[in-house]
Amino acid sequence: MTQATNQSWGGRFSEPTDAFVAAFTASIDFDKRLYHHDIRGSIAHATMLARVGVLTEEERDRIIEGLTEIEAEIERGEVEWSVALEDIHMNVEARLTDKIGITGKKLHTGRSRNDQIATDIRLYLRDEIDAVAAELARLRSGLIELADREADTIMPGFTHLQTAQPVTFGHHLLAWQEMLARDHERLYDCRKRVNVLPLGAAALAGTTYPIDRHVTAEMLGFSRPAENSLDAVSDRDFAIEFTAFASILLMHLSRMSEEMVLWASAQFDFVDLPDRFCTGSSIMPQKKNPDVPELVRGKTGRVYGHLMSLLTLMKSQPLAYNKDNQEDKEPLFDTLDTVKGCLRAFADMAPALVAKPDSMLEAARRGFSTATDLADYLVRAGVAFRDAHEVVGKAVAYGIEQKKDLSEMSLDELKRFSTVIDADVFDVLTLEGSVAARNHIGGTAPDQVRAAAQRAREALAALNGDNRSGGDHV
Ligand code: ARG
């Protein structure tokens, strides 16, 4: 079966499009989600055309009225999308012409679907970026407050996943927060390059109508019109950039997820994940599974995949627009849905983590985590660091044999390894002494953690403030 020749471009065709080809090349199934931004762009375009005298004010008003009604119809679920009309642009335009007659056909004056789609995606992505930024801010803020409350809670710090030195739980949480702070900046940086107006580039070379692109840019909240029409319709680097941001963010969330999964296990037993973020097993009644962090860890893979799709989609494309670019939408949309879902789950869950300070402390004690502190103590007493390292290594071997932490040994036992050791050694062998001694900017001492949390709060407020009104002058 064949379809009727597409009215928007059928003029030069002698036979209708093959039905399979029409379905194969159509994008309406996925680009319909751009309807609001498509209509917004069209209203701005019609307004600009009337401003420069290409449309009469009456024509402009009929177009705007028609488009506004169509948006309401779409929202009420009354619009049946047509695959024969290919995409969101032609579906909306056909509906407009049905409604208001030939004036509807004038809307497309001085533009092309090429600059229209480039504009729609940028408008849509900009709104989505703002939604992502809000969730990211909520997560950061939750982590900062939890870190402040857990500034004194001691846990083992790890390298190679082996107990290394004691740290505070608040310090660990603020490490996560720092990762997210950089992601947040990357997101806003990407937003600046998204927020440039392609409309007016038309198909590829610009248009012969006396358009005013500054008017359209201002109406749509773009910082400026794109400089070059060929570039404006063709490049999707901004979508790649957003997906690169999303990949790095998900990489960070996957690291946090991994730690939550480990910590919630009976073997670590550092935290309790509230029941509402977990599920049970249908066969093992004792199970409480950390599904949310596991799923976020898993979803990281699909976002990396979308980044690779988009990079490959764009690779080697000659200027200007190519139909390849229609393939930008599904990876971008799925990236957005995934990122928003993961951030929402994390923003709800992370601040609700319940620390188990007793088992954290016990784990820090079991792992000889103050061995470095003992070595530093010996150095302060005049022993060379390499010799001190050797002495402490022997003391640890003895501790393993005797099942005793360094702080649990008597002074006599410790003196067997070095005569310079005195009673004041116990100040540094305690976990509290060890963390308190790392008392400089970036260190794990509880006071430093509280100060760092305060700086993080201020940095977050400043970033939000700077970007509230767009902050996108490039
Ligand atoms: N659906 C198309 C896309 O997503 C819209 C632009 C079509 N332009 C064209 N010349 N066929 O890229």
Image: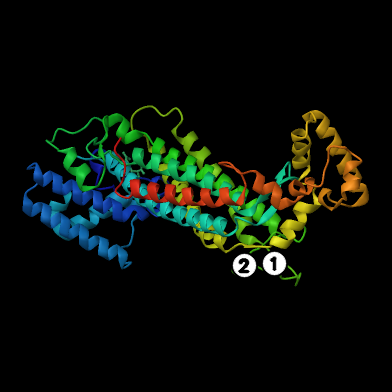
Is 137 located above or below residue 277 in the figure? above
The front one of 366 and 112 is 366
Give the image location of residue 206, x and y in percent: 21, 32
**Residue 22 seen by the camera:** no
Residue 287 lies in what quarter of the image? bottom right
Q: Quadrant of ligand 1?
A: top left
The residue to which callout 1 is attached is 288
Give the image location of residue 125, x and y in percent: 37, 48
Give the image location of residue 399, x and y in percent: 88, 47
Residue 201 lies in what quarter of the image? top left
**Sequence order check: which comes first, mark 1 or mark 2?**
2
The front one of 124 and 350 is 350
Count the labels in the image. 2
Counting other residues with Cα less than 10 Å from the Cα at mark 1, is it few (<14), some (14-19), or many (20 or more)?
A: some
**Residue 361 seen by the camera:** yes
- Of tags 1 and 2, the one toward the viewer is 2
Give the image location of residue 80, x and y in percent: 33, 62
Q: Which mark is residue 330?
A: none
Q: Amino acid at mark 1?
A: Lys
Is 108 located above or below residue 343 in the figure? above
Q: Quadrant of the C terminus?
A: top left
User: Is residue 73 left or right of 442 when viewed as pictured?
Assistant: left
Q: Which mark is residue 274?
A: 2
